[in-house]
Image (cartoon, grey):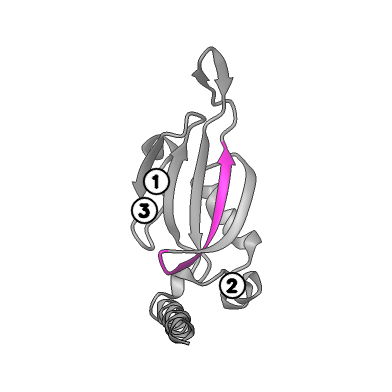
Amino acid sequence: MRRAKIFAAVIYGMLTMGTIAFVHFPNLQADDPQEHQAQARITVEQAREVALRAVPGTVTDSELEKEKGRLIYSFEITRPGEQRSSFGKGKHSIVEVNVSAVDGSIVDIHREHADKREVKQRAPANAEPASNEDLL
């Protein structure tokens, strides 16, 4: 009988802690793509245009996600003619451009290499995109 009470108290405590964690830390909750789409004020096409104006190239992947509390479109762009050699093989570098889904401003631009090193550059809010030479 005593074991059953201890077990019930432990289960109750775990459920309580889990509930508190999701209430106080909403970033732990699962992302809901439909909810994100409803909150976005610009379309993916508009965001893609902004990203390609900042970094010309070919979009290889895009995603609508919440990052650091902001709703963003994330685009991976391969720049034309740019190669990076790694262990004797040519590898394209990929530039990730994050565009705000609320106002269309560039949130972040950073380069990802095939060897997983990143070179980051923060874009100030509502700033004009810098030239490609400045970014990379």
Q: Residue furthest top?
A: 88
Of residues 102 and 71, the one nearer the viewer is: 71
Helix, strand or loop at label 1? It is: loop
Q: Which mark is residue 84?
A: none
Above or below — where is 123 with respect to 77? below
Above or below — where is 30 with respect to 56? below
Q: Is residue 77 magenta?
A: yes
Quote the CA–CA distance across marks 2 and 3: 23 Å
Q: Residue furthest front?
A: 1
For the point 57% across and 16% down, the residue is 89
Quote the CA–CA distance across marks 1 and 2: 28 Å
Helix, strand or loop at label 2? It is: helix
Of residues 41 and 61, the one nearer the viewer is: 61
What secondary structure prevails in the magenta region?
Answer: strand
Q: Amino acid at mark 3?
A: Ala
Q: Which residues are magenta?
A: 68-78
Q: Categorize mark 1 by other alpha carbons within 10 Å: few (<14), some (14-19), many (20+).
A: few
Say which quadrant the C terminus sits in. Answer: top left
Q: Categorize mark 2 by other alpha carbons within 10 Å: few (<14), some (14-19), many (20+).
A: some
Of residues 128 and 7, the one nearer the viewer is: 7
Helix, strand or loop at label 3? It is: loop
Q: Which residue is mark 1?
A: 130
Above or below — where is 114 with respect to 47? above
Q: Position of residue 97 (x, y in %)?
A: 50, 50
Q: Are marks 3 and 1 in contact (CB under 8 Å)?
A: yes
Q: Which residue is mark 3?
A: 123
Q: Is residue 97 magenta?
A: no
Q: Which residue is mark 2?
A: 36
For the point 36% across and 53% down, the residue is 123
Q: Position of residue 82 (x, y in %)?
A: 54, 26
Q: Position of residue 98 (x, y in %)?
A: 49, 55
For the point 57% across and 77% down, the residue is 39
